[in-house]
Image (cartoon, rainbow, N blue to C red):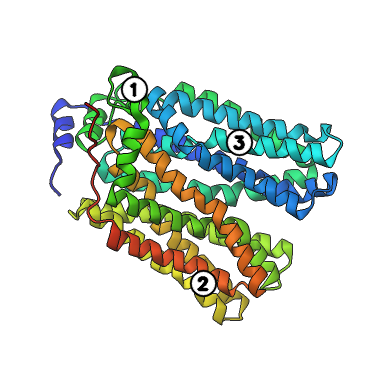
Amino acid sequence: MNSSPTSTAAAASGARRTNVRYWILALIFIVTTVNYADRATLSITGPAMREEFGFSAVQMGYIFSAFSWAYVMAQIPGGWLLDRFGARRIYAASIFLWSFFTLLQGWLGMFATIGAAMTVLFMLRFAVGLAESPAFPANAKVVASWFPTAERGTASAIFNAAQYFAAVVFTPLMAWVTHTMGWHHVYMWMGIMGMALAMLWLRIMRSPATHPAVNRAELEYIEQGGGLIHMSEGAGKADGKTAAPGGWFYARQLLRNRMLAGVYLGQYCINVLTYFFLTWFPVYLVQARGMSILKAGFVASLPAICGFLGGVLGGVISDSLLRRGYSLTVARKVPIVAGMLLSVSMIACNYVDAEWLVVGIMALAFFGKGIGALGWAVVADTAPKEVMGLAGSIFNTFGNIAGIVTPIVIGYILSATGSFNGALVFVGINALVTVLSYLVIVKDIRRVELKHPQ
């Protein structure tokens, strides 16, 4: 194996390269796990809260939707804040605020009437969505700064896989707390944990260029490998070439870029699969497959485990292809296309009756979805250096529109047909559209160069 220039430089200086970037990635993974756990609190505590307050199914539907509406609406403003003030401060504020609003939900019992309780819960869930909006763009921004291109796929896949890890770890834990202590304690403990995590983030997070634990060998390795080691902290105040003075000028360029349009479409379709598993999949197991709620809860965790394994594997495969000399385009597209083709297999559930086959096919589909979920790595590879937060926010906006559309479309399909068959076809087709998007619309994957106002 040939030595890289960075390893040669490290050897020449006699310094052993530090690996602080892995600790930074561990911190991002923990924060993202808590992020998804806080999103899922209502799905776990919902039955107990419905019993206490008397919420109807329609009222619960509106409450569930509050997060996604706010999350989508706040993406671009959140990205602007990231580019203006930097990921360190904005992400710390984001973690603290979404945890604080989660904590407040534990005191919902103070409201005696259904209407008041519903209004307050809707507002708090909406506030959680607003506060969480900078999270994933900030993840992409930090990864682009701390990791060279050859490691970025694995790093992005690992933080993205936290969504599956949260389902595996926190779902049974929150269910146990609800059962033994009451639903209020779920919100209280999650809120306290998140606010403490915000303080930890603020203490540990720095750009590679200013982090006291990073030695010169690691800094050179990151920078020469394509890492943006200054993390664009405060860049918006340093010059006029960021999203701060003219965000919409740059946003229009991003939206008109053919490569990025294909990436945005692909992320939307990938998230259709995500929101199917987060919302309708347990209902499918109960209504269409006749499982008990307890059994469905256990079975629903199996695809999440497979998604986690596939998510990490997709990043490893992509970075392995890069190290073997394949282009960035090939290294990113191969796992995405292969994974999404595997996800199309869920349509086969319409033609089998055996319970174990249904579970196996769904696990395979979610495993494929994990492998193909490399969108955030592509964002880190393609986003302009000046507006990485804005670029990530636009990407996340398109992706999370699926969180609004998917549950509604599937609901209409069920209402019209009385069967999940059409719903599985709808989700499978979206996986296929992702493949076509990356093969036809997205050409070469490369960093976008912006034009600046005169």
Res. 128 mark: 3
Query: Could you tell whether 454 is left or right of 437 in the image?
Result: left
Is the residue 62 above or below the residue 213 in the image?
below
As measured in the structure, the alpha-carbon distance from the residue carrying label 1 to the one carrying label 2 is: 46 Å
Of residues 326 and 111, the one drawn nearer to the viewer in this rendering: 111
Say how many tags the image has.
3
The image quarter containing residue 237 is top left
Is residue 353 in view from this perspective?
yes
- Badge 1 crowding class, 10 Å Cα cut-off, few under 14, some 14 to 19, many 20 or more, is many
Mark 1 element type = helix
- Badge 2 crowding class, 10 Å Cα cut-off, few under 14, some 14 to 19, many 20 or more, is some
Is residue 146 in view from this perspective?
no
Q: Residue at x 28, y 51 (%)?
A: 259
Place of residue 245 in the rendered image (x, y in percent of width and height, measured from the top left):
35, 24
Q: Is tag 3's residue or tag 2's residue first in the polypeptide sequence?
A: 3
Q: Amino acid at mark 2?
A: Val
Residue identified by numbered label 1: 236
Query: Could you tell whether 191 is left or right of 229 in the image?
Result: right
Residue identified by numbered label 2: 425
Of residues 91 and 442, the one drawn nearer to the viewer in this rendering: 442
Place of residue 380 in the rendered image (x, y in percent of width and height, measured from the top left):
32, 41
As measured in the structure, the alpha-carbon distance from the residue carrying label 3 to the one carrying label 1 is: 26 Å
Q: Residue at x 35, y 59 (%)?
A: 336
